[in-house]
Structure formats: C-alpha cells, structure tokens
Amino acid sequence: MKYILSLCAFIFLLSCTTQKTDSQYAKIEYQAGACFGSCPIFTMTINPDRTAILEAEHFNFSKDFSKDEFSKSLEGTFQGVIKEGDYNKLVSLLNGLDVKNLKDKYGTKNITDLPTSYLRINFTDGTSKNIEDYGKRGSEKLRETYMFIEELRHNQQWTKVK
C-alpha cells in the first residue's frame, strides 16, 4: 500500500511541474507614445525570464485627464515579473503575428492627434524587428497584442524602483 501511495504522490508531483515556454524572443519592448489627450505614455521591456521594466511617464495610473499632468514629474520606473500564463499568452500572440514578416511601419499621419506605438523584438538568433504603428491600427492581431501588453500595466505586480 505504501508503494502505491508513493507512486501516486510521485505522479502527482510530476503533473504539477510548471510548463516552461521555449521562447524565441530575447527581448520584447513596447513603447506607447503621446497623443493630444490622455493616452498612456510608457515603455515596457520584457525579458525571456519574465522579468520586466515599466517606465511610466504620464496617464498610466490616473483616471482623470488634466493638462497639468505634463507639468508633474514622471510617474516612475517599476520592475516586476510577468505572470507565467500572461507571458505564455504574449508569446502566443507574437507567434501568431509572424513578427519577422510584418511591415516596419503602419499608419498614415494624416490625422495629427493619434498615438504611435513601437514594438521592438530581439530574437534569440540575433536578429531584430522594429515596428512603428501610427494610430495603433496596423492589423487586428497587432491591435490585440498592443492591448494585451498595455493591460500588463494593471494586472501585474509592479514595484517602484525610481
């Protein structure tokens, strides 16, 4: 009976091990630029070990819009570890984009009050891809990826370091 219980416990422990994502991404960086309103301005850098830096400038944590926001100091630099499930979801979104084959630029600057996003990916093979998207409307999959990354500002544990 002891052997059966030991075997069951061993099988249970093996089934509880975390699944490691074998990421092809050496660094994921997303930058959200300003608009003529209260668009969040920040840069987030995510490493393959899920450690992340959030450099928040303006409109990241406040709900109210005020032009005085720009006269205030920057919101700060934060560090955290992206939850494993969220990191896996991000990798899945990026894989679905076929990042290396995306255009380098999206959007036209005929409208002057839209924010620009920058998605910079460094791959483990030493290559990189930089995408500039004026208006954040490059494609539906890109928009979904931008929204997912932007939501990480609110659904992760961040510790202010500066």
Image (tube, rainbow, N blue to C red):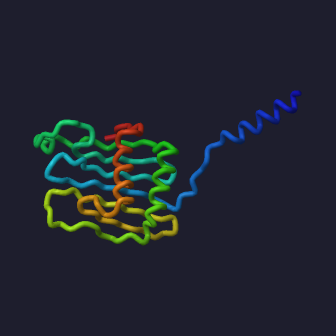
Location of residue 17 in the rendering, given as x and y in whole percent from the top left corner: 65, 42
Q: Residue at x 35, y 71 (%)?
A: 103
Q: Please name whichever residue, 156 or 107, is drawn nearer the observer in this view of the structure.
A: 107
Q: Does residue 68 lie above or below 111 as drawn? A: above
Q: Please name whichever residue, 19 or 135, is drawn nearer the observer in this view of the structure.
A: 135
The outermost residue toward the top is 1
Q: Residue at x 38, y 49 (%)?
A: 148
| Count of numbered badges drawn on the protein | 0
Location of residue 36 in the rendering, given as x and y in whole percent from the top left corner: 14, 52
Quadrant (top left/top right/bottom left/bottom right) for the C terminus: top left
Q: Residue at x 76, y 39 (%)?
A: 11
Q: Does residue 2 lie above or below 37 as drawn? A: above
Location of residue 112 in the rendering, given as x and y in whole percent from the top left corner: 13, 61
Q: Please name whichever residue, 49 or 105, is drawn nearer the observer in this view of the structure.
A: 105
Q: Residue at x 41, y 37 (%)?
A: 157
Q: Is residue 75 left or right of residue 83?
A: left
Q: Does residue 127 lie above or below 44 as drawn? A: below
The outermost residue toward the left is 67
Query: Quarter of the image holding residue 67?
Result: top left
Q: Is residue 15 left or right of residue 30?
A: right
Query: Quarter of the image holding residue 5?
Result: top right
Quadrant (top left/top right/bottom left/bottom right) for the N terminus: top right
Location of residue 108 in the rendering, given as x and y in whole percent from the top left corner: 21, 68
Q: Is residue 60 left or right of residue 119?
A: left
Q: Please name whichever residue, 158 or 62, is drawn nearer the observer in this view of the structure.
A: 62
